[in-house]
Amino acid sequence: MKVDIYHLYNHFEYSNCVYPIVLDVLKVWGQSLGFDVRVVVCKEVDVDLETGADVVAISVYTQTAPAAYRISERLRQAGKVVILGGPHFRGPNYREALSHCDVVVNTICEDQWKDLLQGISVGRIEPRRPQALYINDDQNRFRYPDNFYEAFDSQRWYQIPSVPTSIGCPYDCEFCSAYLQGKYILRNLDTIFNEMAHIKGKTVFLCDATFGLRKDFTIELMNKLAPLEKKILVETTLARLKDDELLDAMALGGIKWISVGIETLSVPMGKHGGQNLEDNLKRVIDNAHERGMLVQGNFICGLDSDGPDSFDRIYEYYRGSDLDLVLMDLLTPYPNTGQYDRINREGRIIDRDWEHYDYRHVVYRPERMTVDQLIDGFIRLYRGISDARFVWNKARQIYGNNGFTAEATMMISYNLFNGFDARRKEKALRRNQLDLATGLLPHISQPEPAVHLELAATDAGAIQSR
């Protein structure tokens, strides 16, 4: 049996350069059964509607949900079994997909995935079902396979290989719907080392929502990876990076690029590690640079703590600091998050077209500024940090602090990409601003609850009515 697994995107982003690893997990599990499985990352127009695959699975993020539904309808007409899953269905949203596919997945573990594919292969689960099956790993049994490295050959030359070091996220941020939110499960050290050793290139992203949370584990991992001489990218919090011993271990292990979720300068968060946010940032940046590591700060513009002055504050901070790169986007209150539920209760959701949940539209009313102030301020800020002179000064600063290294050059290239991205988003936001002013936005009603079938996590071999 042939299986196609798709990750769809609407706009090329930085995330396109990092491979969607969970899809490779599904590939490895399917191949262990003898099935022919391929993973494809593309836009809607590039999906192979004439595929010879028997099964097509699509990973669905909110902004690609309408595209996934359109593709699913066409593939089902061609007799394919269509599976829709992904972050968009981590909650009651799965109901809207029940009429568009044969199987809708919230989360899934190895036994459930294998049982699903075997059920399709023997005809127990047929295409064009009147009511989709629903699958949820409600016992949180998902684990990365020990032979995950077998899927690395799927990755394109420009994609950074990813090796997971944990599952879940210990934080419960209102704006996020991370898998296993509030939980944090570490992987086996030898397994991580084996996967790292199988990567042919030098650059690797260690996938962990808050790298370094377990200090003892992280130090042991870094000591173990050091002989491989990889150049490693990680994502973590300011609270972790205030520890000099941990930073020493990270430098030894090969970490060259640290992405820090700052989110806002308007109010300190628990993961910032204290009240003096900007002082903490300066210390972290200085300590990282002393150890040959670059620091990227990630911001979300439009949080309820942000007012019209928040954009100038970010600009002035970035301009005057040694922060190497800023990535920022407009707040998008995604469904299945506490933030969306709260803003929706407050009557501040103004656009329910899922395709607009793409960081290029404002879909809610901010609390401390108008929609126009949010759009104008974001455009002004993004123009400022992507201005040619600004980028040139940052390039001089990065090379001055870190030398003419490959990772410094890559960081500068991301700064250059900001200019391209800023122009694209400005055009989209100006169109969005006009639509909001003229009342042209469509209202997308939410679906009613539906009866469904569930493939239970407690009995992967049984399909039960619910």
Image: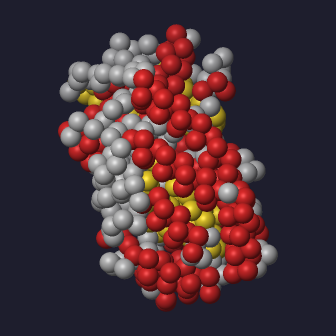
The quarter of the picture where the N terminus appears is top right
Query: Is 56 on the left-hand or right-hand side of 461?
Result: right
Q: Nearer the viewer, residue 163 or 439?
A: 439
Q: How many marks?
A: 0
Locate residue 344, reporting x and y percent: 25, 38
- What is the x, y in percent for residue 321? 56, 76
Q: Quadrant of the C terminus?
A: top left
Residue in the image at 68% along x and 47% along y: 420
Relative placement, left or right, of 164 versus 141 is right
Q: Is residue 397 above or below residue 374?
A: below
* Residue shown at the point (69%, 81%) measured from the top left: 401
The answer to whether 66 is drawn above or below residue 112 in the figure is above
Q: Residue at x 34, y 49 (%)?
A: 369
Farthest-out residue, top? 77
On the image, the x and y values in percent for residue 370 come to 36, 44
Residue 40 relative to residue 108: left or right: right
Residue 161 appears in the rendering: no
Q: Quadrant of residue 99?
A: top left
